[in-house]
Amino acid sequence: MVSSFYNIDPREANIKNLSLSSLKSSAFPVSRASSKTNEGKYEKQQYQNGYEYVIGTDDVGRGAIAGPILSASCCIHKDALENNLLDHVNDSKILSAQDRQEIFDQILESDIYFRCAERSPQQIDDSNIQKATMECFQESIQKLILEEELPLEKVYAVCDGKSTPKLVGSATPIPCRPMVDADQKIYTVSLASIIAKVTRDKLMCEAHEQWPEFNFKDNKGYRTREHVEAIHKYGPCPIHRMSFKALKHR
């Protein structure tokens, strides 16, 4: 079933054992961030304002022409921040696949809480990518708050980008601000970007096993010349986004 790999909880999936041997190293920049992203500076500022949890949220797959849009939200209690400042954390796009996986493995062994949410290609086609992204943001944040039983009045949320979803807890809206390039500026958002990237890459590698002609293990559903040529040759598969320009009228 196409939908079977869209409902994987990263804590239940065998992501820690994800093999990187099938990924071309040339497809990822081999670089490391200088150190921990701002040493949690932004989080510490919000702790001083009375908050105990700063939830960072980021998405991956927005520009892809196949596969889901996926978001991750994560947080650390203020008393646990110093012991959970991992090395080399930054925006997932400037880390190598190996670095992302190593950091993800450390996250699983840490006191960092996270949840993911996704919208399928069909759901994206039925609405639009912006709405689907905001729905993912809202769901991953609210799942984290509810399932970890975070005190609403002590939660502050930040989303990478220019928009945020409306978050309502009881009668009081939860503060949630957008920030461009937050995945390079705020520690928990950087963590979220890594979690989202590793999780979605796992899903796309699984999709490759079902539709190898599209080379999803390397392009991860993004538009490349090879990918477009495969669509012309074989036609779209069930996880292509038919509302996107490259797929319209196919």
Image (tube, rainbow, N blue to C red):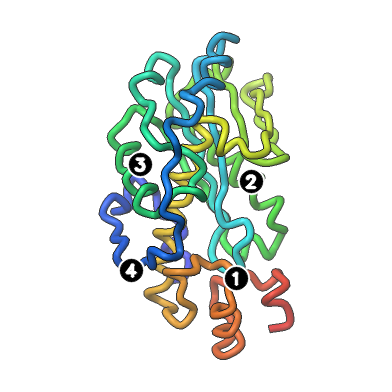
Direction bottom: furthest residue = 233
Q: Secondary structure at mark 1?
A: loop
The residue lying toward the viewer, choosing from 246 and 2, is 246
N-terminal label among 2 and 1: 2
Q: Secondary structure at mark 2?
A: helix
Graded by Cα atoms within 10 Å as few (under 14), some (14 to 19) or many (20 or more), the crowding at tag 1 reads some
For the residues marked 2 and 3, what is the alpha-carbon distance in whole angstroms?
26 Å
Query: Could you tell me the amino acid type at mark 2?
Result: Glu
Please identify the quarter of the rendering in which residue 49 is found: top right
Residue 223, label in figure: 1
> Is residue 3 positioned above or below 158 on the image?
below
- Give me the residue at 44% from left, 44% from top: 195
N-terminal label among 1 and 3: 3
- Give me the residue at 60% from left, 35% from top: 182
N-terminal label among 2 and 3: 3
For the residues marked 1 and 4, what is the alpha-carbon distance in whole angstroms?
19 Å
Q: Position of residue 95 (x, y in %)?
A: 44, 48
Residue under pointer 4: 22
Residue under pointer 3: 103
How many labels sit on residues? 4
Query: Could you tell me the amino acid type at mark 4?
Result: Ser
For the residues marked 2 and 4, what is the alpha-carbon distance in whole angstroms?
32 Å
- Give me the residue at 34% from left, 27% from top: 111
Which of the two discs, 2 and 3, sits closer to the camera?
A: 3
Q: Position of residue 196 (x, y in %)?
A: 48, 48
Query: Could you tell me the amino acid type at mark 1?
Result: Arg
Which of the two discs, 2 and 4, sits closer to the camera?
A: 4
Q: Position of residue 140 (x, y in %)?
A: 53, 40
Graded by Cα atoms within 10 Å as few (under 14), some (14 to 19) or many (20 or more), the crowding at tag 3 reads some
N-terminal label among 1 and 4: 4
Residue 135, label in figure: 2
Query: Could you tell me the amino acid type at mark 3?
Result: Ile
